[in-house]
Amino acid sequence: MSGDKTTIALIRHTESRANAGHILGGHAGCTGLSDRGREQARELRGALQETGVLVEASIAVTSRLPRAIETYTIISPAVRGGRLPATRDCGFCDVHWGDMDGAPEDDLVLPATIYSSVAPQGESWVGFVRRVTRALTSLASQAAGSTAVVVTHGGVIKTSFRAYGGGRYRHTEEDVGFGVLAIWEKAVDSEWTLSFYGDSNSLREGIHAPLS
Amino acid sequence: MTVHDLDEKLLQKIIDMIRKCARLLDPDEPIWPERPLREVGVDSFGLVDLLVMLEDGFDIILPDDQLTPEMFESAATIAVVVASAQTAG
């Protein structure tokens, strides 16, 4: 996975304590993985080691949220033999919840429009997608001709379907499961292709979920 | 600033950007300055594509509080905001 081809592997973090407790887990509210999430991450690490898909990665990034950082810590032995530390980039963070960070999910009132912030000091849908699109575009340039792995969030992976997939894939509206891996590949002068989308079981079984 | 004060080159550049984001629009279908974006098939992700294109193309940053449905009504309304941002920058 190096040379003329650019590969970007986006991994959703595994289950966090905030997910399990139905809390909006932003920079303040995220307290890392649940026990189940750690087990899911170990499962994913096993599948990555068996398949060797990230063995040639040369760039590793996580969001700034503890659940993404912890997921990478657990899977990192499967990334370039455990010799690739990850940088942290808020461009790959989940929605900035502002004053709702750490509040119960049930307390969230859906914004009136895609331009409206989710809460005071928070982010709108347009602001979130703009931030993530810029992070994805910048990473694609940085990783040109090599392989990058990013441990991030469901909304970021959804955004990649537009930023990289250009609307050619119909996955955007579906939920992204814990530990799901989306691998995007691009040859020189070609469009991005989704070469794999699935969880650790799909990865082990070599099942590619075609979503176009 | 009003629509009538706008530079034609600025408007045309914005219309060209809108066309790139209106992926289902027939190439022969006209986009005039006041034509609503919703009529030309720019979806919500297309709006973000357009926003990134505007910021890169005009070397501006549009603060979140300026991003409103009214701003994205048409090429003309976008142009008013872009021209103001250029002046402020």
Image: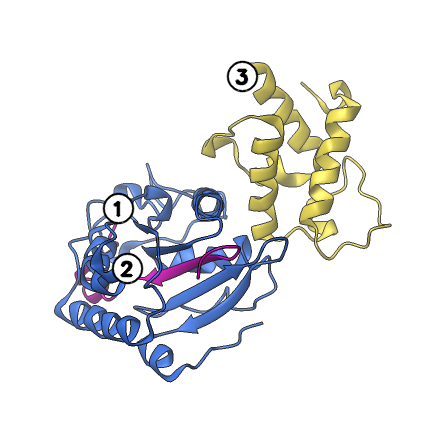
Chain colours: A blue, B yellow
Tell me what residue is drawn at x 56 percent, y 59 percent. A192
- The percent position of residue A59, horizontal first and vertical second, equals 34, 50
Element under disc 1? loop
Q: Which callout, 3 or 1, points to the residue nearer the camera?
A: 1
Q: Choose the circle earlier in sequence order: 2 or 1.
A: 1
Amino acid found under the numbered disc labelled 1: Arg
Number of numbered discs: 3
Circle 1 residue:
A64
* The stretch drawn in magenta includes residue A51: no
The subunit letter for the residue under badge 1 reads A
**Residue, x 61% and y 58% (percent of image)?**
A191
According to the image, label 3 marks what residue? B89
Question: Mark 2 sits on what residue?
Answer: A80
User: Label 3: chain?
Assistant: B
Along the horizontal axis of the image, is B21 left or right of A161?
right
Kind of residue indicated by mark 3: Gly
Nearer-the-camera pick, A55 or A192: A55
Pointer 2 and pointer 1 on the same chain: yes
The range drawn in magenta is A1-26
Q: Is residue A12 left or right of residue A16?
A: right
Q: Position of residue A11 (x, y in %)?
A: 34, 62
